[in-house]
Structures are given as structure tokens and as C-alpha cells.
Amino acid sequence: MKISIVIGLIALLAGSAPSLAQGTSQSLAPGQTGSLPANTKREAMIIVGSTTLAHQTGLIADRLVSVRGIARPELALSGTARGIARFCAGVGPEYPDIVAASRRMNRRELQRCIENGAVDVVELRLGYSPLVLAVERGDPVFGLTARHLYLALAAEVPQGGDFVPNPFKTWKQIDPRLPDLDILVYGPATDSGTRGFFDDMVMQAGCRGLAEVKFIYSADERVRQCTTLRQDGRYVAIAEPFAETVMQRVITGPYGAIAVVPHQMSEDYEAELELLPFNGVLPTQAAIHADDYDLVQPVLFYVKRAHMRDDRGEGVVRGLREFIAEAMSEEAIGPNGYIDQSGIVIMPTRDRERARRSAFRLERFER
Amino acid sequence: MRAAVLALALLLAAGSARAQAPSTSAADVGRHPIIERLADGWAWLTGHAGRAAGMVVPPSPSASAKSLAHADESVKLFKMLKEAGYKLKAISSGVSPVPGLQFKFGIVQELSEADLDHIERRLDQDKRLRPGLVAEMERAIILTALHINASELYVLEELKLQLLPYPKAEFTLAPREAPLPRNYDILLRAIEGRPPLSWRGAQSHVIR
């Protein structure tokens, strides 16, 4: 099959071409909530997803109860990946209504949602939660790159055209400019959304472009090769809820141990920790807004539009519209709002307005 | 056909221009005016065309190959295509009054979700850094490739970018589950140490 497109035509269409980054947004008609029978109702919303966002989710739930008179949502947070899997498992009162996510829902997950009837998912973007690398205050501070971390933590590393079991024991062996310290990193286990983000933004980024990796055609095989971590104790995977444990371990752990944690958690331990630059940049608000700091996770909620109760009282649960209004309010995500004060880096005004507009229109999330 | 009409029109126009000047050559005496006009026109056209050729005719294939040997490292579009899993596999250059220059890219790597996110981010950054029509066109080509590959049914197997005689992008799609040629099966079975299937005289294709 061949398609010929004159570039001029592409240019004309470019303005209207759907962006993969944002997806083709589509406004939905009110009341278009799927084909659920009227008796499929539940009293309280069910929220699943990221434990890292437990505090923020709790704050929104409190406000829903106290300000908007909505039944207290049931929080069943067990990690982003599991949360999305449950959220996308189907439509009906037994399935969750909202998922808190510390990364974007990927195309496969969205596809599963659609296959299971949850076609109309609305994405709420509240701000950013940078992932940071930190050491105990007093330990050597040195900048790391994605390549350094990949070479330090992968189970196998490329050498002479093939992959060999990771031989590196100290940072200096990877790069002579790095200190002669044992490699020891505490970070999230595979049940965490943060680990998925770490795999994508650190491990895959670190191995992208290496000659041996370029030879692997299959994406699945390449991802497996790049994200399989060593099992000899130099990467210590902590299960959910991992952040608090990681902090404790790095503070009480050996000299030079590195923690991989969400920024909001590191703020609670400001006196004990020191942040490391990643790819030469420290995670300041200015660097995050300028898109200079690479390890920035979005703070997101996905809402199942098919569960919304409409004006006739039909639909799974009441409160989804109120949840959207509350989560996207200036009191929440504006400067000095309660989300801002919870350690999340808020978006610049223009981005906040855009996110709010998209949420209020109930635009369908597409990738 | 259109080229022939154009050439004839040029010849006649050039001939009429030359006809203004008096003819002085003794050898020209007695020639039919139309023949004379055509001959003059041809001489005018070939003379000018020869000089103009250097300006409009693309470099020879070998010159193109030489200058573009490292193009995928320096040209922004080629770099972006490389990140999107495509690599330059051929350059076609045609030498004629209507010159042609075409680059052919083939898929060398499937993209993971993280790769797609990475490229989308790079395109966003590029949009801020490189405004303008050409950059927008380049991004549109990359996005089109990504969109096609995001489909479950097809994969963009080959991308042709034509610069001359006019810019054009040509996308060749292949079904993701395309039937494999019989040779693939024979090779696979040979690698796995299994005997080839006896099918339509496969005996003659046994790899020993």
C-alpha cells in the first residue's frame, strides 16, 4: 500500500494534524455516558492508583466531603500500574471510577480500557512531581546522567558488540570523573508507577543510541534488555509504599548510597538529604517549568466518564463532576493552593488554564 | 508529452528572437526559413541549456552520495528520522532537464512507548526552537510516521523524501502481519536445525 503526500499538502495540514503528545482531543456531548442500566449505582466513588499521590488524593477527598457534600471516596491505592489495570478492567459499579497516576497512561493501557468499554477517559493534569536523586547530607555530591545510571544498574551492559553481566562495582569504573564509591541505589520496585517512569526516563534513555542496542529491532526485546536491573544488591528495590522506606534506608545506609524518590518526599527530609544533578540540571521549579530537568513525572488523575451520573440520576456514581471541579480549582492547583503546599510543583498559569479547560470540557483522552 | 510541447514552444520562441538578427553566413543561403528558425532555436537552446545545466541539474549520484554520506548526522530531519527508527538506505538522483533527487529511508527499529514519548518531547522542543514552514513540514513527516506506526494494522516500512523536481513525501505501508516469503521459512528452519517443509518442490531448496 502506498500513500503519496505532497509536502506542501502536509504543511497545510500540519496545523490540524493530530499531535501525538496531546492526542486528538474530542469534546463529548453531555449525557453521553455509555449504555449502563439505570440501577447500576454506587454511593461513593472508588479511587485507585499511585501511593505516591496518596496525600494529594486524600486532600481532594476531604474537600469533596467538607465543601461539596459528596460521600467520602473509597481510596484503594496500590500503585499506578495496578491502579490503571483495575481502572481499565471494565465499566460498572464493581470497577473504579478514578485512578491517580504518577505517569501518563500508555497506549497499551488505553487500548485495554477501550476494549473493556471505558472509551471515554478524561485526563486531569494537576502539576508535576519530579523524581530526584539524593544522597545523605555530607556524602559526596556528584552529577549523574541517564547513561551513568543505566551502566550502573542494568543486569547486562554492552561490551565489544555483545551484552555481558554488569561488571561495574564503583561509579569511577563507569566514568573516571565520578567518585570511587560503591554503586548502591535504593529505588522503587516494579509495582510502582515511579519505577515505570524510572525505567522509561533513566534506563531506556541511558541505553538509547548505544551501538549494541541499535541492533535490536524489536521494541519489546530492547525494553527488556535495557530495563532489567542487576540482582546483586547494588540496586535495592523497595515495594510500595516505597518513598518513606527509601529515605530511611539511604539515611541509615552505607556512605554514598543514592535514593531515587519523588521530590515531594525529599522535601520532608530536606535537612538530611542533598539532591544530585541529573543530566547536569538540579530539579528547581524554574528548570522544571523550562523543561530542562528531564525526570519530571506528571501528576494525573484519569476519570471514567462512563461512570458519571447524569441529570436524570443515571450512571454509576455521583461526584465525578465535583471531583473534576475540585481537583482543577485554583484553590487546589493554583499558587499556594493545597496541592502546591503538598509538595507538587504546580504548572505555569497558561498551562493550568489549558488543563482546566480540557478537563471541564470532558475531552476524551487519546494517545 | 507536455515536455515536448514546452520544448517546441521554447525553440520557436527562441528562433523568433534570433530571427530579428540578420543572417550573414554563406552556408545559410537558400535554407527554408522554418528550418533556419528551428536550427537557430536549437543552437540557442543547447547553448543556454549547457550553461544552465550546471545550475539546475542535480549533482551526479556519486557526488550526491559523497556529500550526503554523513547527512543523517547533520540534517535535522534525518536526525529526527533516525530517532524515529528510520535510516537512510538509498539516494536516487536523476540527471535530465527535469532533475530528480530522492532519499529512501527504511525502518530499522520498532519504537517503545518510552521512545515515542521521547520523540514527542523532542518535537515539542523543536517546535519552540525552530518555528517556520520547513521545520513544520519536517515535524509533520515525523508525526505521520509515528501515527502510522502507532496503528495495530500497518507499519511504515519505507519513507521516500523527494526534493527534486518538487518536494514530496511518500509513505510505503506494510501490514504488520505480512505473509513471509518462503525463503524466510527455509532460513528459519535451517537456523533451528529443522528440515524444510516439503512444499511445491522444496527438495530443490534444501540448505545443506
Image (cartoon, coloured by chain):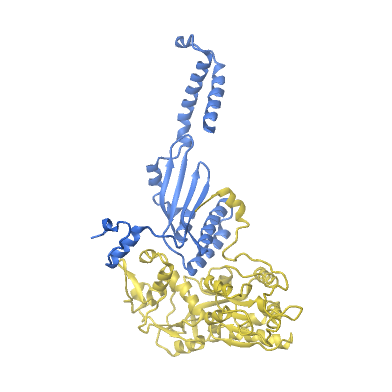
Chain colours: A yellow, B blue
The total of numbered circles placed on residues is: 0
Residue A287 pos. (x, y %):
55, 71
Viewer-proximal residue among B134 and A367: A367
**Which corner quadrant of the image does residue B82 belong to?**
bottom left
Residue A243 pos. (x, y %):
51, 85
Q: Relative to A143, is A302 on the left or the right?
A: right
Quarter of the image where the C terminus of chain A is located: bottom right
Residue A70 pos. (x, y %):
72, 86
Viewer-proximal residue among A190 and A37: A37
Residue A114 pos. (x, y %):
58, 72
Q: Is residue A83 above or below residue B71?
A: below
Q: Relative to A71, is B78 on the left or the right?
A: left
**Which corner quadrant of the image does residue B50 belong to?**
top left
Q: Residue at x 52, y 30 (%)?
A: B4
Q: Is residue A144 above or below residue B148?
A: below
**Residue A335 in sight in this render:** no
**Residue A37 in sight in this render:** yes
Q: Is residue A344 above or below residue A76?
A: above
Viewer-proximal residue among A341 and A302: A302
**Which corner quadrant of the image does residue B13 belong to?**
top right
- Single out the residue that lies furthest toward the left: B208
